[in-house]
Image: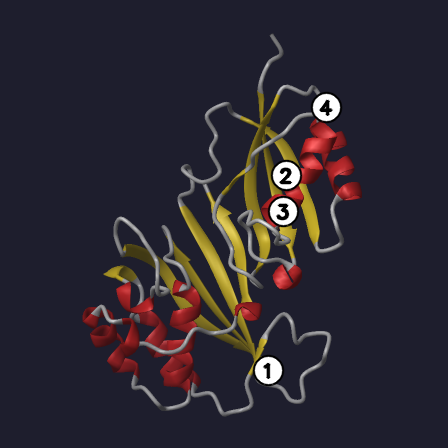
Amino acid sequence: MPITRNIKITLAYDGSAFFGWQIQPGQRTVQGTLEGCLSRILGHRVSVIAAGRTDTGVHALSQVINVHTHTPIPTDRLLSALNNMLPHDITALSADTAAPEFHARYMTQSKQYVYIIDTAGPISPFLSRYVLHVEYKIDMCAMEKAAGYFVGEHDFTSFMGTGSCVKTTLRRVRASEVIQKKSKIYYFIEGDGFLRHMVRNIVGTLLLVARGKLDPDDIPQIIKNRDRSCAGPTAPARGLYLFKVNY
């Protein structure tokens, strides 16, 4: 019997032209594209396991997947073949043999996301798919203070996308901070797990604070209310990146 191998692959992708990560009939998805390429290279149908799903239009700087195969192709050749076959908006950054028990999703310790806001104007058309452009004045002090309230374990129902079905809405956020570099504002958040649209809903709320429409000290009560209507709008997907997966 051929020996089954477990291969860990790290990917980066531009989510602009994908209907999210997860396979959906009739739609171009990252998972569907990747599985199609890997199946042709490995000579059998594969089903990849990802660290997490990204929504339509969300990008990834470091998405991690694992795939099982009995094909004895060296990982360096697999990486080269995969990049030759993948479309221009997905790149395989690395491919390594993993331990048999490695599971890209269940063994995740934390995930980091970054959301990028651009305050310069007018914005370059070459950046418009990768940042949220705002033309109003940002109160950085207020935004920074508000971001700090998200750290810790909370019930994030107020920041969960409508229609979600989860066992628990409790999530632990390890870091939440806002950094400004010239015209760019970067919101970094690290957590053990995230609800659907949670990061984008947090960003939408932080932008209300940044515009003076909410006080930073309103955040604890918004969390406590467990009511989606109390928080801000969902920020556009184009500014959000899966930054890093920690194991």
Type of amino acid at the residue the image marks with label 3 = Leu
Q: Nearer the viewer, mark 2 or mark 3?
A: 2
Q: How many angstroms separate mark 4 from mark 1 (CA)?
A: 46 Å
Q: Nearer the viewer, mark 2 or mark 4?
A: 2
Which residue was labeled with disc 3? 11
Say left or right for 134 vs 38.
Answer: left
Q: Nearer the viewer, mark 1 or mark 3?
A: 3
Q: How many angstroms separate mark 1 from mark 3 (CA)?
A: 28 Å
Q: Nearer the viewer, mark 2 or mark 1?
A: 2
Depth check, front residue: 86 or 185: 86
Type of amino acid at the residue the image marks with label 1 = Ser
Tell me which corner region of the image, top left, top right, bottom left or bottom right, holds residue 93.
top right
Depth check, front residue: 56 or 65: 56
Q: How many angstroms separate mark 3 from mark 4 (CA)?
A: 19 Å
Which residue was labeled with disc 4? 73
Q: Is residue 204 visible?
A: yes
Tell me which corner region of the image, top left, top right, bottom left or bottom right, holds residue 158.
bottom left
Type of amino acid at the residue the image marks with label 2 = Glu
Tell me which label, 2 or 4, sits earlier in the chain.
Answer: 2
Tell me which label, 4 or 1, sits earlier in the chain.
Answer: 4
- In this figure, which colouring scheme has been used for the structure? secondary structure
Secondary element at tag 2: helix
Residue drawn at point x = 51 percent, y = 59 percent: 55
Which residue was labeled with disc 2? 35
